[in-house]
Image: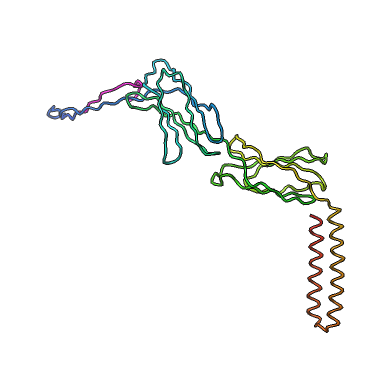
């Protein structure tokens, strides 16, 4: 059946009829109310990390007939909050508190007539994410490694925006997005101050940034220190070889010690170049 009016009660009857004998059964009646119309829109009023203030526009279609607005706020899969508003009520907003940061919440709006709901107007709203925690970094001469922990690691849609700027005069700023809780900033200049910040992002909402400023190491100082260390290792190597000869230790063991010293010096050179 089509071309039926909204928010209207219809009575249907069903009768069995015999074409041969012309007999009819007693009719069975069905009362049916068609859903009311809805033209409202859900909008956000104010968002914080733990609250949502939502509002809606009125349904003002000509001839629209309904008794109330019904608003359903889905806290989670098991808990729903249902609120109602009179059509003549000038206040068309709802405030929800004690929510979790960075969470998505589904909201439904209906018009209701004779206990029959209209089709829903549905929209998903999200609270601001919380600032990252335990933010720290490890600085080297040409790179800085950033580490942090998520306020709520169960939210897979939250990602992190890393931005940093230096005083070297070459790059004013850089910005990167990542889903991991760590980041390596490379190709930096030694002996340069850099400011790093990490921001949690959920959809288009950004948290408060966690930031810190650090000075990268000096390559020259590291190189000088490592040269001193290499000289000391070479001196110990020579002393060890002399002791091996004096104590008549088999040459295989002396050779193993010599290789160990060479590996240690190679590692120092690699660390210096990082």
Point out residue 41 in the picture as x, y percentages from the top left corner: 48, 25
The answer to whether residue 188 is magenta is no
Place residue 238 in its image quadrant: bottom right
Place residue 199 in its image quadrant: top right
* Image mark count: 0
Residue depicted at x 85% and y 77%: 241
Front residue of this view, candidates 147 and 2: 147
Residue depicted at x 61% and y 39%: 201
Q: Which residues are magenta?
A: 1-14
Above-or-below relation of 139 to 87? below
Q: Is residue 178 left or right of residue 52?
A: right
Residue depicted at x 79% and y 39%: 171
Front residue of this view, candidates 97 and 10: 97
User: Seen from this angle, which residue lies furthest top?
Assistant: 62
Above-or-below relation of 25 to 238? above
Point out residue 130 in the picture as x, y percentages from the top left corner: 59, 40
Front residue of this view, candidates 35 and 202: 202
Point out residue 272 in the picture as x, y percentages from the top left corner: 81, 57
The answer to whether residue 13 is magenta is yes
């Amino acid at each position: 059946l089509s071309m039926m009016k909204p928010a209207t009660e219809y009575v249907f009857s069903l009768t069995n009829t015999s074409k041969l004998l012309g007999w009819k059964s007693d009719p069975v009646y069905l009362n049916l109310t068609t859903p009311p119309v809805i033209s409202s829109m859900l909008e956000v009023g104010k968002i914080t990390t733990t609250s949502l203030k939502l509002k809606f526009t009125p349904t003002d279609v000509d001839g629209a007939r309904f008794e109330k607005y019904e608003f359903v706020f889905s806290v989670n899969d098991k808990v729903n909050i249902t609120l109602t508003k009179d059509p003549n009520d000038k206040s068309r907003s709802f405030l929800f508190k004690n929510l979790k940061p960075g969470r998505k919440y589904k909201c439904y709006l209906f018009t209701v007539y004779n206990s029959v709901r209209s089709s829903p107007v549905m929209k998903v709203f999200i609270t601001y994410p919380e600032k990252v925690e335990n933010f720290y970094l490890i600085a080297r001469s040409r790179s800085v490694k950033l580490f942090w922990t998520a306020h709520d690691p169960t939210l897979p849609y939250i990602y992190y925006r890393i931005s940093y700027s230096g005083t070297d005069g070459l790059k004013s700023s850089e910005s990167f997005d990542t889903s991991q809780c760590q980041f390596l900033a490379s190709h930096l200049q030694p002996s340069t101050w850099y400011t790093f910040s990490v921001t949690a992002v959920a959809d288009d909402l950004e948290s408060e940034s966690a930031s810190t400023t650090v000075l990268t190491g000096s390559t020259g100082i590291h190189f000088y220190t490592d040269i001193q260390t290499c000289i000391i290792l070479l001196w110990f190597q020579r002393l060890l070889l002399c002791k091996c000869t004096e104590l008549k230790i088999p040459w295989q063991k002396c050779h193993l010690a010599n290789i160990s010293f060479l590996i240690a010096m190679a590692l120092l050179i690699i660390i210096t170049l990082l």
